[in-house]
Image (spheres, helix red, strand yellow):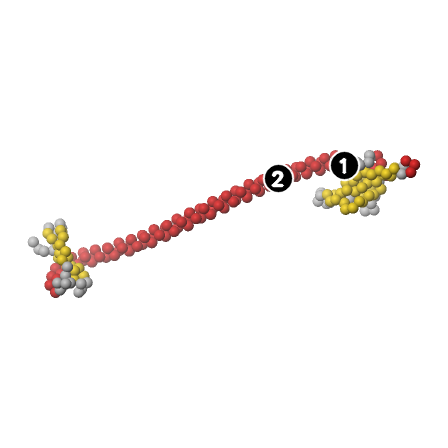
Amino acid sequence: MLYLATVQKQTRFFSTVKTELKLLACKRGDNSWSPVSGDEVIPAPEASKFNGGVLVLVDVTASKKAQNIREAAPSLVKILQNFSYLQEKWEAKEKERDFWKEALTHQSAELNRREMELRVQQEQLTKQRQELDKARLELQKLQIALEQQKKARSNPNYMSDANHLTSHASPQAQKKVVNSDPTNGGESTLVLDKSVGIGIRRTPVR
């Protein structure tokens, strides 16, 4: 397993130097690094060519034997460069996420506004439809009344029935309305008989 370590040198009797490596971090399978807990030191006579305090990379076997010791500076530079690249990439992703979040928030607000407008328009259309239905019903009633009046005027017994109803109507039940009738060249009389609940138009013969 690959470790990051620092070189430690201890001077012993008769100027002999003991070289050791203090393990700082180990590399995992996903290229991440984990710190080594505690002070783990392994002997490394092969690291005597390095000065004390130098950072090195070392392969450590299961029996804690150091192999392939090399200076860590070039690798650390690459690691830092890669870290910087990843950080920039992460910041770009964060900006993109914030942009889309703001865009979606604005879009949601716009959709809510459009929904309110459509709801108001729907209510207006419903009200207009009701008014139109009411006007259509009034028009149908008016057409029926006009048809009935037209049929009554074409009936030969229309005038005799009118005279009969007028003669039998009580003075209190009759109401005479005189108006100008240019179609007949004279006056017309509208007799309302409350006893029968109908109105008869009678035109005097000139």
Other-residue count near label 1 (Cα within 10 Å), few / some / many at <14 / 14–19 / ≥20: some
Q: Residue at x 21, y 55 (%)?
A: 146
Residue at (71% x, 43% y) in the render: 32
Q: Position of residue 164 (x, y in %)?
A: 12, 63
Residue 72: assigned label: 1
Residue 163 horizontal/vertical position (percent):
11, 61
Residue 87's disc number: none
Q: Residue furthest right?
A: 14
Q: Give the distance between the C-alpha atoms of the residues marked 2 and 1, in whole angstroms.
A: 28 Å
Give the mark, 2 or 1, whose residue is nearer the N terminus: 1
CB atoms of marks 2 and 1 within 8 Å: no
* Residue 131 spot, x, y in % from top left: 32, 53
15 sits to left or right of 193: right
The type of residue carrying mark 2 is Glu
Q: Decide: few, some or many residues near mark 2? Use Cα within 10 Å; few <14, some 14-19, many ≥20.
A: few
> For the point 24% across and 55% down, which residue is it?
142
**Image vertical order of residue 158 relative to residue 69, above or below:** below
| Secondary structure category for the residue under label 2 | helix
- The answer to whether 96 appears left or right of 138 in the picture is right
**Mark 1 is on which residue type?**
Ala
Can residue 157 be seen by looking at this rendering? no
| Residue 89 sits above or below residue 172 on the image | above
- The image position of residue 102, as x and y in percent, is 53, 42
What residue appears at the point 60 percent right and 41 percent down from the top-left corner?
94
Quick one: quadrant of the C terminus?
A: bottom left
Q: Which quadrant, please, contains the N terminus? A: top right
Judging depth in this view, the residue of 41 and 182 nearest the camera is 41
Q: Which mark is residue 91?
A: 2
Residue 148 in view: yes
Quarter location, residue 16: top right
Mark 1 lies on a secondary structure that is loop
Image-based side of 32 in relation to 58, left or right = left
